[in-house]
Structures are given as structure tokens and as C-alpha cells.
Image (cartoon, rainbow, N blue to C red):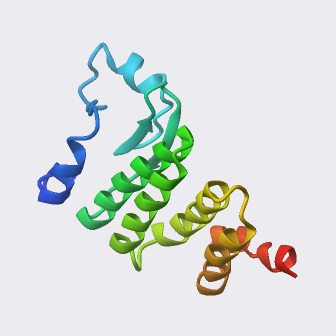
Amino acid sequence: MGAVTFPDAEVQTRLQSFKNYKVDQLARHPDFRAAGGEQRVTWSPAFIFRDRKGLELRRWIGWLPPRTFAAELAFVQATEKYRRGDFAGAIEGFDQVLSEASGTALEPETLYWKGTAAFLAGGKDMAALASSWQDLAERFPRTHWGQHAAVIADVSA
């Protein structure tokens, strides 16, 4: 991560919006147990994102290329808005992720959450949900998210 992803200009810009902590698992620092153990880090690199209240928003393990890492950071920001009930802001954030994450594994999940945000933003607007979820189910039928969204065919019928 330090040689390729973190030096990337877009990643650096996005990271400025986060409080960052780095724990070297090999250093056996006395604070590692408190920092890593509490988070149940099973492998590295591990990325754990929390909201202002300390609730976990997202977690992943493993290296990501700069483009995907930057999109993940944008996804975390959109998810935080969603959790706060700022559905319009979440939709805007998810749209940003979709423009940046096209062709990545993040795209189906983003479509899923964008659909739920549109549903909630529109006062439980089924048409808004159906628009996103039908696209998701058609384009990504074999993914976890596409399979979840496939229920929209039954609801819309």
C-alpha cells in the first residue's frame, strides 16, 4: 500500500477527510493489543472505518490499487451520510462512486445502496428503488448484491 496506493494524489486527497491510524503488526508495540486486538484484525493490511459515534461503517482486508482504494473511501463517506439519514447526500456520494468504480467489484454494492437511499429519500418510493435494483439485478445477476436485488422483480410484479 505504501509504495503504490498511498502515494497516489487522489488517495492522498481523500485520506485528508479521515483520521488515520497505522499499526505495524510486526513491531509488537505495546499498544498493538489495544489498537488491533479490539478490532479483531485477522490479516493485514486491514482497513476499518468508523463513524463519529464509533460505529463501524466498513471493513476490508487486503491490498487495493489506487483507483479502487479512492472509490472505497468515497463509498465510506456516502455510507456515513446514509447512516445519518442524509439520503440525498448519500445518493450524490454513491453516484460519485459509480462514476469512479465502473468495472470494479464495488459497483454492484454501490448500486444496491444507492437504490435503498433513493427509496428512503423519496418517502419509500418503490419506483426509485426499482430503477436501481432492476439495473443491478440485470447487470450483476451472479453477485451477492445482484441476487439480493432480484427480489425487485417479485415486488414490481
Q: Quadrant of residue 119?
A: bottom right
Outermost residue on the front side: it is 123
- The percent position of residue 37, horizontal first and vertical second, equals 46, 24
- The percent position of residue 42, horizontal first and vertical second, equals 47, 39
Q: Is residue 157 above or below residue 51?
A: below
Outermost residue on the bottom side: it is 138
- The percent position of residue 54, horizontal first and vertical second, equals 48, 26
Q: Is residue 66 visible?
A: yes
- The percent position of residue 60, horizontal first and vertical second, equals 45, 49
Q: Is residue 4 visible?
A: no
Q: Residue at point 51% right, 45% down?
A: 86
Is 153 on the left-hand or right-hand side of 60? Answer: right
Q: Is residue 76 above or below residue 112?
A: above
Nearer to me, 117 or 108: 117
Q: Quadrant of residue 27?
A: top left
Q: Residue at point 11% right, 54% down?
A: 7
